[in-house]
Image: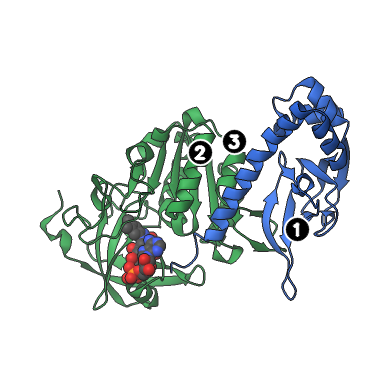
Chain colours: A blue, B green
Amino acid sequence: MKIRSLEQIVAEHRFFTGLGDEHCKLVCGCARNMLFEPGEYLFREGALADRFFLLRHGRVALELTAPGRKAMTFRTLREGEIVGVSWLIPPYRWTYDARALEQVRAVAMDAECLRQKCDADHHFGYEMMKRFVPLLVEWLHATQLQILDVYGTPA
Amino acid sequence: MHAPDAMLPRIARIRRRRRESAQVWTLDIEADGTEASGFAPGQFNMLTVFGVGEVPISLSGDPARGTQLVHTIRAVGPVSEALVQLKPGKELGLRGPFGVGWPMAEAAGRDVLLVAGGLGLAPLRPALYRLLAGRHRFGRVRLLYGARGPEDMLFRRELASWQRRADIDIEITVDHAPSGWTGHVGVVPTLIEHAAFDPGNSIALVCGPEIMMRFAIDALRRAGMADAAIYLSTERNMKCAIGQCGHCQFGPTFVCRDGPVFRYDRLRTFLGLKEI
Ligand SMILES: Cc1cc2nc3c(=O)[nH]c(=O)nc-3n(C[C@H](O)[C@H](O)[C@H](O)COP(=O)(O)OP(=O)(O)OC[C@H]3O[C@@H](n4cnc5c(N)ncnc54)[C@H](O)[C@@H]3O)c2cc1C
């Protein structure tokens, strides 16, 4: 197998399509490769959201637990997708668990490092927002559909 | 033209019934005088429970086995409730098949993407049987199916056996699931984003609750599909089923006669209008 550098991985990830070389370097300065075994948590609800992940391989379940109830999965994510948006908004706490369903290879992005670079270079910050806002909108639409419970029993 | 007795139900009998989920049953029905020429995928019958009423229900079985009529019904009100209660041997009334079904001829030579939500898999299943029977005539065949939860999925055994086939790609997602579920969780449009298909040479057949179809169509268009390559099956209350009473009018069309399957570009102005 050909070993690809972190720069290549980031540049080729669909989330960063169209990002210029300079900005790509800024992103890579905050990135590191991580491996999670099946069942391992990428993060837990309530913990500090100090990173987010680009999934390179494997699927991740986002779960919520309520007292007296088993954990419920409300979304699964796979290769090419992003896990975690809470790093963007104070108080930077995860609001759900993210658990590897299979072996997961991901690029972890240091949130503090990225936020500082976004603050220092607004052009870079804007490039990042252009990628995160559509993601948030897609999540919002999917959530609307889930809340509407369109397959449920008609009232 | 329909024969003059198109309004007169034939007598049919329940041969077998099986439960798909809490509210959904599949009925195998045999009817006197059912022609072996069968039905087209996407067509529906009008089923009567005597003394209760008549409702349109799509055919969900194999069109190659035209004398065996299969219907998958969700109990939502008086007639559908009475239908799923009918035990083997019981009689019911049947008119049909009616309507314009899925564009199987147009699908030839192209990739076929079937997008089903909830009970919407039932009217699409005959199209799947037809695609698999003439597999070499079509490009890549892909079924994207979304259900409310793992326990609400229809035709589970059959889906599992299709998932083992190499000539069809099946992706299933549920809206939410207990943590033991290892499949996808998320709404159907999220599957479209990941489905590899050639938007320039594909046809999409979409069936499910109307809101789900609207979101699915948005995702298909974002993936580059033309409106004229998207087909959807619509549901409107109907009475006569032969384009006379006007009950199922949808813009300038009658769902029973011109549909239930429509090409999206011919329907898009009317989709989502509250008053229609
Ligand atoms: C072309 C066509 C094909 C159909 N195919 C099938 C099928 O294969 N299987 C099946 O179970 N149903 C199918 N339907 C829908 C079915 O005909 C209706 O659900 C029917 O109204 C049920 O009659 P009912 O007397 O049991 O309930 P009704 O008294 O008519 O309705 C009870 C409640 O359910 C709601 N309701 C009715 N229809 C729908 C619907 N389609 N979606 C959501 N809520 C609804 C009503 O608003 C009401 O609140 C089809 C409809 C059409 C037009």
Q: Is mark 2 within 8 Å of ligand 1?
A: no
User: Within 10 angstroms of label 1, few (less than 14), some, or many (20 or more) residues?
Assistant: some
SS at badge 3: loop
Q: Position of residue A116 (x, y in %)?
A: 85, 36
Chain letter behind tag 1: A
Number of the front mark, 1 or 2: 1
Q: Name the one closer to the observer, B26 or B189.
A: B189
At x 59% / y 36%, what residue is drawn?
A: B196
- Residue B35: image quadrant is bottom left
The relative height of residue B76 versus residue B220 in the rendered view (above or below) is below
Q: Position of residue A60 (x, y in %)?
A: 75, 51
Q: Identify which amino acid the numbered label 1 is placed on.
A: Tyr
Q: Is residue B240 visible to us here?
A: yes
Q: Position of residue B65 (x, y in %)?
A: 36, 55
Chain letter behind tag 2: B
Q: Identify which amino acid the numbered label 2 is placed on.
A: Leu
Q: Which mark is residue B220?
A: 2
Ligand number 1: quarter of image: bottom left
SS at badge 1: loop
Q: Identify which amino acid the numbered label 3 is placed on.
A: Ala
Quadrant the N terminus of chain A occupies: top right
At x 79% / y 30%, what residue is drawn?
A: A10
Q: Position of residue B142 (x, y in %)?
A: 54, 42
- Residue A144: image quadrant is bottom right
SS at badge 2: helix
